[in-house]
Amino acid sequence: MTDQPPLTIVSPTDLSVTMRDYLVQVYRLGDREAAPGAFVSTSAVAESIAVSAPAVNRMIGRLRTMGLVEHEPYRGIRLTPDGAREALKQLRRHRIIESFLVTVMALPWHSVHEEADRLAPVTSDALIERMNGLAGHPTHCPHGEPIPTADGAITPLDDVLLTAAPHHVNLIVTRLRTREADRLEYLGALELLPGARLQVHHAAPFNGPLQLKLESARDAYRIIGHNLAEMLRVRIV
């Protein structure tokens, strides 16, 4: 049995911007597959943050000794309850800023993700809560993601990928998985936004395109590729 460095008690004030970014990325990678508590690979974290594998390993080692992540060989890393709580606190800031930029500043909804990435680390808690009030205390960000509470709690969404949804059943779009501005803008042009109601009318075999029937207009149909359909999560109405 190998010796492990002792865990240290960490205060939120001890976390650097970079540490919080790592925690958020680990959470996002797990949440992308609707499994926020799942293990994710260090290579996936390195790719999402655009840093080298050795740099990720060094940071993961620090976060592990702080009790914020678990690391198992051949499985990867996952957040501890404390790590998940800190990640969700940071995501709350990010999603409130997105909502403020769209609702109050009237920025295009498909372009606010990167702006929020830049603003979240340098915006005070008091200003975040002011933004929250001015935006009307939103419960979800413009992309449909739930906004965590101030103490880092979140209500899980009971949703599935559009590609896994049953056919000829009333569905509602809950959230979008992509943050690429061009994809978001295209989904908006197709009226496939959070809150849109639809049915999967037909899906071609072998990961072929899907034919969707929208509830918003009579006989309104959309055909989208399988890869784009994987960017949407839905639940049965």
Image (cartoon, rainbow, N blue to C red):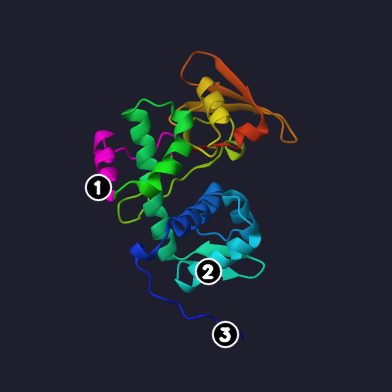
Identified by mark 3, the residue type is Asp
Q: Which circle marks residue 3 in the picture?
A: 3
Q: Which circle marks residue 94 in the picture?
A: none
Residue in front for this viewpoint, 46 or 183: 46
The residue where tag 1 is placed is 126
Q: Residues within 10 Å of mark 1 (few under 14, many from 20)?
A: few
Q: Residues within 10 Å of mark 3 (few under 14, many from 20)?
A: few
Comparing labels 2 and 3, the label whose residue is closer to the camera: 3
Q: Earlier in the sequence, mark 1 or mark 3?
A: 3
Mark-to-mark CA distance, 1 and 2: 32 Å
Mark-to-mark CA distance, 2 and 3: 15 Å
User: Percent position (x, y) of residue 205?
Assistant: 74, 33
Comparing labels 1 and 3, the label whose residue is closer to the camera: 1
- Residue range (magenta): 125-144
Residue 65 shows in this picture: yes
Judged left or right of residue 101, residue 38 is: right
Report helix, strand or loop for mark 3. Answer: loop
Residues at circles 1 and 2 in contact by the CB criterion of under 8 Å:
no
The residue where tag 2 is placed is 70
